[in-house]
């Protein structure tokens, strides 16, 4: 069986670029049939957008804008080209942000990441991304089915049952977050359960420090690779066995722009990841993910010739990801608004990756008994994540506008 999913992965870079640019005018034209895109791209000549220079004249749509757009024009901000009933599925991600799914075999384009991680037709995959409301699990589920794999829809949690499933059904691979795979392995070691059949892992939604990847290898997981994507775009890039950067999917156009602007930066410079996809139902034209990365020079040693990025290098805005879930500044404001007696509030995310901790620091001179518990309950209600509360003296938090402080170690 071929080392590559198809011949597109090894085509000359010049050929790929020419074919993508040739498709751009039709994409812009289709996008402008959606009222939201018609407003954003008003005055644009779709036929003239056939180069990166022309594409760069269009505005960047940042992820942080989606919530407001969707509130103004539910459910998808006028950015879909079909009615909700013509979609394959409708999801709700934290924020909340609503995400549409097309009806194709692999609408999120994850099949290349699965193939690069060694998964083949006939393999069994234990899918430990969340299946409830959010699209993460379904992204991989569809790609695995397209590849010809059987899927165990395991979801998140219930570690003992997960181990029983691994022992009984003997999946060839795990897909999910790094932190949950670590929990499963540690629990299996404590109980003496043999899960040695699990030799491949494809991970996402959290950073994967080199030390944790090495630890997985020591536990017998021979292949440990990552993919990177968003609920708005699907898969963006993935690792191969070469493990030298992340390779862009074949159906995307990548730009790295200076944070807060629409201006592309030179290859090698760190900036915001901006992606244009070719989805027929939810086209994204210059979608700013809020993530930082940089383009690596040359093709991957694995032989795939598409653009490579360094991977996730932080956030261009204050929205951050905790335990695989986005937490946004607006959510911190919503929590604080429930308690008018509070002063400034700042959410501090700390710990090492795969062991995230949230602490909401709030200004209040004399907190009443039980207030911390009520605030902690509000944190869980709004973000769907657990967090602690610390009261600090009024005026002690900096007056710098920052409400989320990512203080984690990425070593």
Image (tube, rainbow, N blue to C red):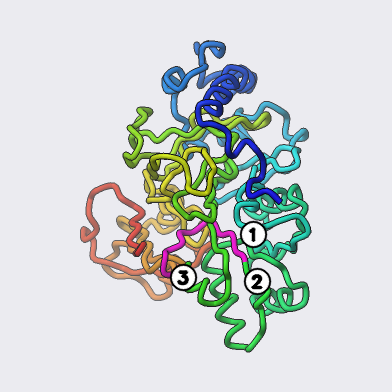
Tally of marks: 3
User: Does the magenta-highlighted stretch encompass residue 209?
Assistant: yes
> Which is closer to the viewer, label 1 or label 2?
2
Could you say which is closer to the camera, residue 69 or residue 153?
153
The residue to which callout 3 is attached is 214
Task: Report the disc number at residue 198.
Answer: 2
Residue 23 visible to the viewer: yes
Label 3 packing within 10 angstroms: few (<14), some (14-19), many (20+): few
Q: Taking 55 as reference, is 265 left or right?
A: left
Which of pointers 3 and 1 lies earlier in the amino acid sequence? 1
Q: Taking 407 as reference, is 209 left or right?
A: right
Whether label 3 touches label 1, CB < 8 Å: no
> Which is closer to the viewer, label 3 or label 1?
3
Which percent across, then down, holds residue 319?
42, 49
Label 1: state its secondary structure: loop
Q: How far apart, in angstroms, are the residues tagged by discs 3 and 1?
A: 25 Å
Q: How far apart, in angstroms, are the residues tagged by discs 1 and 2?
A: 20 Å
Residue 371 visible to the viewer: no
Rendered residue at 61%/82% (across/down): 188
Rendered residue at 38%/40% (across/down): 297
The residue to which callout 1 is attached is 130
Could you say which is closer to the camera, residue 8 or residue 287?
8
What segment carries the magenta color? 200-212
Q: Quadrant of residue 398?
A: bottom left
Rendered residue at 39%/68% (across/down): 352
Which percent across, then down, holds residue 56?
42, 23
């Amino acid at each position: 069986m071929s080392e590559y999913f198809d011949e597109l992965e090894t085509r000359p870079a010049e050929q790929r670029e020419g074919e993508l640019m040739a498709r751009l005018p039709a994409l812009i034209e289709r996008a402008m049939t959606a009222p939201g895109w018609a407003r954003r791209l008003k005055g644009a000549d779709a036929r003239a957008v056939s180069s990166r220079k022309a594409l760069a004249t269009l505005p960047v749509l940042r992820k942080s804008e989606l919530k407001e757009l969707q509130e103004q024009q539910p459910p998808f901000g006028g950015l879909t080209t079909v009615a909700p009933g013509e979609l394959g599925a409708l999801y709700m991600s934290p924020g909340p942000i609503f995400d549409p799914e097309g009806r194709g075999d692999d609408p999120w384009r994850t099949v290349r990441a699965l193939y690069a991680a060694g998964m083949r037709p006939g393999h069994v995959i234990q899918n430990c991304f969340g299946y409830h409301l959010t699209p993460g699990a379904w992204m991989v589920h569809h790609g695995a089915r397209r590849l010809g794999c059987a899927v165990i829809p395991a979801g998140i949690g219930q570690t003992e049952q997960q181990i029983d499933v691994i022992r009984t059904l003997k999946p060839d691979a795990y897909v999910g977050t790094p932190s949950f795979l670590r929990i499963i392995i540690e629990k299996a070691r404590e109980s003496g359960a043999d899960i040695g059949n699990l030799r491949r892992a494809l991970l996402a939604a959290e950073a994967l420090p080199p030390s944790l990847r090495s630890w997985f290898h020591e536990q017998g997981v021979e292949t440990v690779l990552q993919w990177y994507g968003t609920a708005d775009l699907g898969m963006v890039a993935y690792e191969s066995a070469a493990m030298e950067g992340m390779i862009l999917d074949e159906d995307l156009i990548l730009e790295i722009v200076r944070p807060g602007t629409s201006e592309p930066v030179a290859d090698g410079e760190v900036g915001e990841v901006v992606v244009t996809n070719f989805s027929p139902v939810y086209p994204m034209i210059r979608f700013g993910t809020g993530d930082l990365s940089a383009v690596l020079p040359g093709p991957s040693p694995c032989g795939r010739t598409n653009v490579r990025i360094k991977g996730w290098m932080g956030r261009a805005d204050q929205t951050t990801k905790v335990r695989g879930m986005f937490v946004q500044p607006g959510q911190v404001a919503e929590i604080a608004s429930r308690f008018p007696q509070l002063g400034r509030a700042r959410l501090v995310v700390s710990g090492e990756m795969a062991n995230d901790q949230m602490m909401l620091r709030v200004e209040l001179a004399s907190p009443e008994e039980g207030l911390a518990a009520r605030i902690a309950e509000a944190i869980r209600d709004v973000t769907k994540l657990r967090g602690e509360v610390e009261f600090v003296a009024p005026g002690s938090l900096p007056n710098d506008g920052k409400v989320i402080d990512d203080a984690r170690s990425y070593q």
